[in-house]
Amino acid sequence: MKRELAIEFSRVTEAAALAGFKWLGRGDKNMADGAAVEAMRLIFNQIDIDGEIVIGEGEIDDAPMLYIGEKVGTAIEGCNVVDIAVDPIEGTRMTAMGQSNALAVLAVGEKGCFLHAPDMYMEKLIVGPNAKDAINLELSLEQNLKAVALALGKPLTELTVATLAKPRHDRIIKDMQGLGCRVFAIPDGDVAISILACMPDNQVDVLYCIGGAPEGVISAAVVRALDGNMHARLLPRPMVKGPTEENIRIGEEEIRRCEAAGVEVNKVLKLDDLVKNDNIIFSATGITKGDLVEGVSLDGRIATTETLLVRGKSRTVRRIRSMHYLDRKDQRLKDIIL
């Protein structure tokens, strides 16, 4: 992909972050997500790409979405043909409640680069470069944590594992703490923690959780770009939420869609299965202040954003701090963000 596209894609997450910020603390996560989706779509369609959304979001939370199969971009002759994975707001509940670590994120790769999977649950195990050869999701979590600790040259008592603070993880958190590990349980938003696990000079050694597949593919893209490693497994809803009649019905549909896409549920997926090469661009803009980037700040009609922009081919990581004179924006975008 052309180098200058990276800046174009940062404009997409900036617009989504500004749109989500409008709904910060207002208690309506779907309105926030809908605004971010609309802003993303608007900017995508101004970029000279022939793009297709291959990983979208919305089915798990019944939220608005950039739908799988949607075409975006100008599609002018000679432009890059790309696949796109998006999460217009990673942390919709955190945005609605005014909590930290909400992001607008996307990953863009060559055609056929990303795993095509339904919006369902995914088990994820992620480490940084220094432990990239230590993980194997075919083994138990305890075996993996011991192997990671050994690779990092530290005892289990000094290993820090991040996960999601969800009821489905209650027993797992206790088991990890029982091994002596330090566990950081965050309310939502595992993409940011996935990145931190692969960055130097951070507190997170491992991420383990069961979260959304869209976020998992986006995480895999940036993990690959940062030379980390990830194993994953797609899980039907009854395995995660329990075998109720409704969950069984949804799980059967998830399995059917996986079969149509040529993807097996409950099979360990390695990094190459999730993202085929490192010619990717990843962009994340903060909506609220977090561990990865600063959130949107507003002074009158001037908004400031911070974006983490990663170009996998050159393994370049940039932090972009931008000032947006909102009155100067395109009228269609002003209608969304103001």
Image (tube, rainbow, N blue to C red):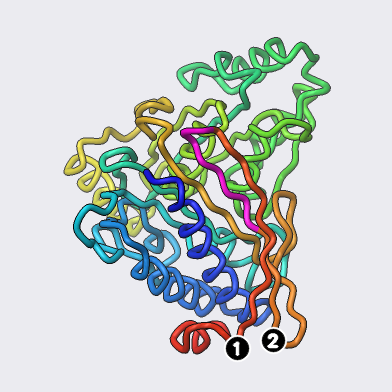
Please give the name of the residue rendered at 22% of the width and 62% of the height, measured from the top-left corner: 76
Please give the name of the residue rendered at 38% of the width and 28% of the height, measured from the top-left corner: 269
Q: Position of residue 257 (x, y in %)?
A: 22, 48
**First to last magenta residue range:** 307-314
Decide: few, some or many residues near mark 1? Use Cα within 10 Å; few <14, some 14-19, many ≥20: few
Residue occupied by mark 1 = 327
Q: Is residue 219 above or below residue 150?
A: below
Task: Report the front residue among 313 and 155.
Answer: 313
Q: Does the residue at mark 2 contact the one at mark 1 (Cβ under 8 Å)? A: yes
> How many tags in the picture?
2
Please give the name of the residue rendered at 44% of the width and 86% of the height, measured from the top-left corner: 332
* 3D distance between C-alphas at marks 2 and 1: 7 Å
Residue occupied by mark 2 = 301
SS at mark 1? helix
Q: Position of residue 170 (x, y in %)?
A: 66, 42
SS at mark 2? loop
Main secondary structure of the magenta stretch: strand
Q: Is residue 164 above or below residue 176?
A: below
**The image quarter in which residue 286 lies:** bottom right
